[in-house]
Image: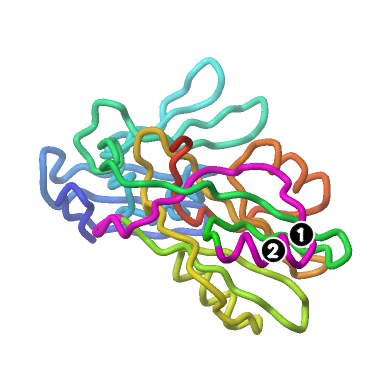
Amino acid sequence: MTSREGTTGRQVDFPSGVIIWHGSGPRQGQTYLVTGCAYRLFFQYGGAGGWLGLPIGDATNTPDGQRQPFEGGRITFVRATDECDAEPIADSTAPPSAAAPAIATSPLDLFYDPERRDHITAAAAATVSRALAAHYTRVRGEAYVLTENPGRGGAPLKLFWNETLGSHLTTATPDGERDALSAGYVFEASQGFVWTDPHRETTPLKQFRDPGTGRYLLLANPATEADAQVQGFVFVRIEGYAPVAP
């Protein structure tokens, strides 16, 4: 394996974690353990090849839980809520901490049709017009999307439609697109572009799914996430990172 810092390494997997050995770089020959919720979050963000990179220390205890450092950021475990959170380190030289280039943006809004029980997370003007014409109502703004492809580090945000379910799905990851196609969704329209890794002044785009109906909901606003959890939606993955302001 090779991290985005250029560090090579090897890993040994076991049921509840992974041991990673540094094969090069300033920590050559050293090994670190990633386990627990940090292990799940580490691989959710792409493992050693993602923006976190290789671990550069074992987890250490804090008054509230634990914290583990990585090349591009850190994972913090909060004991009271039994949750983990990953964040880039502000002074890191890794790409996630870099400021996003100045690119025009467009609002990414959430729309809902109570009759269809369908959500649309959309930014393209044509999609928004069709949604309003079909009697969808705007719920709230979720974030913003880039109107142009930023090149390396960017990904298209794609809207899919499932005629049988009467449901939309918005995704920016290969895994999300595979889920859409395997579930009978077809591509409908591009909604702009998002970052694949965190940048300053961006927020994660989170994919949720209702296991009862199979419907999806892409969100970024904490208020929408709270509503989704009350309605029985469960978290699936991070689809990308979107600007929080124009």
In the image, residue 170 sits, relative to residue 72, either above or below, namely below
Tell me the magenta residue range: 126-153
Q: Secondary structure at mark 2?
A: helix
Label 2 neighbour load within 10 Å: few <14, some 14-19, many 20+: some
Query: Is 128 or 115 nearer to us in this picture?
Result: 128
Q: What residue sits right under mark 2 in the picture?
A: 131
Q: Does residue 58 appear anywhere in the picture? A: no
In the image, residue 142 sits, relative to residue 43, either above or below, namely above
Q: Secondary structure at mark 1?
A: loop
- At a point 30% along the width and 34% down the height, the residue shown is 57
Query: Is 221 or 126 nearer to us in this picture?
Result: 126
Residue 34 vs residue 168: left or right?
left
Q: Mark 1 touching mark 2, by CB under 8 A?
A: yes
Q: Quadrant of the N terminus?
A: bottom left
Residue 134 vs residue 61: left or right?
right
Instruction: Residue 231: give x, y in percent of width and height.
Output: 83, 50
Label 1 neighbour load within 10 Å: few <14, some 14-19, many 20+: many
- The residue type indicated by label 1 comes to Tyr
Q: Does residue 231 appear anywhere in the picture? A: yes
Instruction: Residue 186: give x, y in percent of width and height.
Output: 59, 82
Tell me which numbered mark, 1 or 2, is placed earlier along the sequence.
Answer: 2
- At a point 48% along the width and 31% down the height, the residue shown is 76
Assess whether residue 7 is covered by the magenta stretch.
no
Q: Quadrant of the C terminus?
A: top left
In the image, residue 118 sits, relative to residue 37, either above or below, namely below
Instruction: Residue 118: give x, y in percent of width and height.
Output: 77, 64
- At a point 20% along the width and 42% down the height, the residue shown is 30
Query: Is 76 or 127 nearer to us in this picture?
Result: 127
- The residue type indicated by label 2 comes to Ala
Q: What residue sits right under mark 1 in the picture?
A: 136
